[in-house]
Amino acid sequence: MRNLTILDVQAATLPVAPSPQHTLGPAICVDVVNKAVYALVSDNNGSALLCSVQLDTPGSMAVTGEARQVCTLPFSMTSNTSVLASNMQFLMERESVFLALRSGDIFTVRVEVQGDSEAPELVGTVDSGIMACAWSPDEELLALVTGEARLLLMTQDFDVVDEFPLAQGQQGEEVQVALGWGKRETQYHGKAGKAAALETSDPVQSQIANARMDDGEDDGQTRISWRGDGAFVAVSFIAQNGA
């Protein structure tokens, strides 16, 4: 992150005042081609609104005017206070805003930089909820983690092409296996002597245990990351046993 430099800072007035009582989480995405920023906010009535801010000519980060309201999403924060955005992304090929909620609903909104945008479309629902999701770099595949700790791979049309549990009970064919040197009590410990042989705590496991959620360094959220070429996807999650 050291190569990131702030080019400019501009402010735009939203069409509604965001309500501090109803938060939808970090929900913002950028259309880099048309220089538009989309944000999901909620008003004092709990309504979820999609707003857009048009940037100036290419190469400039100046805001041309106030933000405008694109549409109202068909859910309310007052009826379900657990509504949070799991992922929000602008899909270049579809020219649409993709929105996935923790509750399990998936919406798409086809937007127009100038003119009226289409109404939000509910394209599907995951009954167990969506813990995390992320599109591949080429936007061909969507990786999604359900509330049941299952990983789904979907196409652009939201058809499931693969599904499997994250917590694997058995090792795969290419899983690395660590070869030990026998029991700890029979190993040679040099100057540490018998005290090291009788020591039951594993320093590596102790470090892992100390870095868990209770120390405040891990928020416990599930995260998905794709490799740049889209060939591999990695998932970080907390297993049922806390590992």
Image: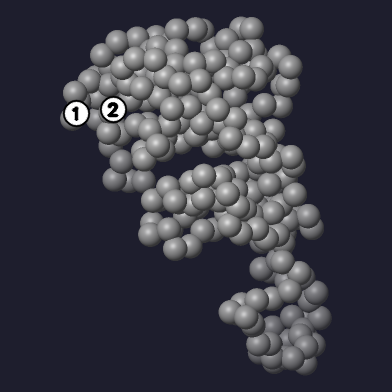
Horizontal arrangement in the rendering, residue 93 relative to residue 203 (left or right): left
Task: Inspect this view and state whether residue 84 appears.
Answer: yes
Q: What secondary structure is marked by label 1?
A: loop
Q: Give the quarter of the image for residue 173.
A: bottom right
Screen quadrant of the C terminus? bottom right
**Residue beneath the point at 63% across and 29% down:** 84
**Residue beneath the point at 72% across and 45% down:** 147
Q: Depth check: 176 or 165 in front?
A: 165
Q: Are marks 2 and 1 in contact (CB under 8 Å)?
A: yes
- Image coords of residue 110 (percent x, y): 43, 27
Label 2 to label 1: alpha-carbon separation = 7 Å
Residue picked out by circle 1: 58
Horizontal arrangement in the rendering, residue 27 relative to residue 162 (left or right): left
**Residue beneath the point at 69% across and 91% down:** 181
For marks 2 and 1, the one nearer the N-term is 2
Q: Amino acid at mark 2?
A: Lys
141 up-or-down from 84: above or below: below
- Image coords of residue 166 (percent x, y): 68, 59
- Image coords of residue 64 (percent x, y): 26, 14
89 up-or-down from 112: above or below: below
- Image coords of residue 121 (percent x, y): 55, 27
Q: Residues within 10 Å of mark 2 (few under 14, many from 20)?
A: some
Query: Which labelled disc corresponds to residue 11?
Result: none
Residue picked out by circle 2: 35
Q: What secondary structure is marked by label 2?
A: loop
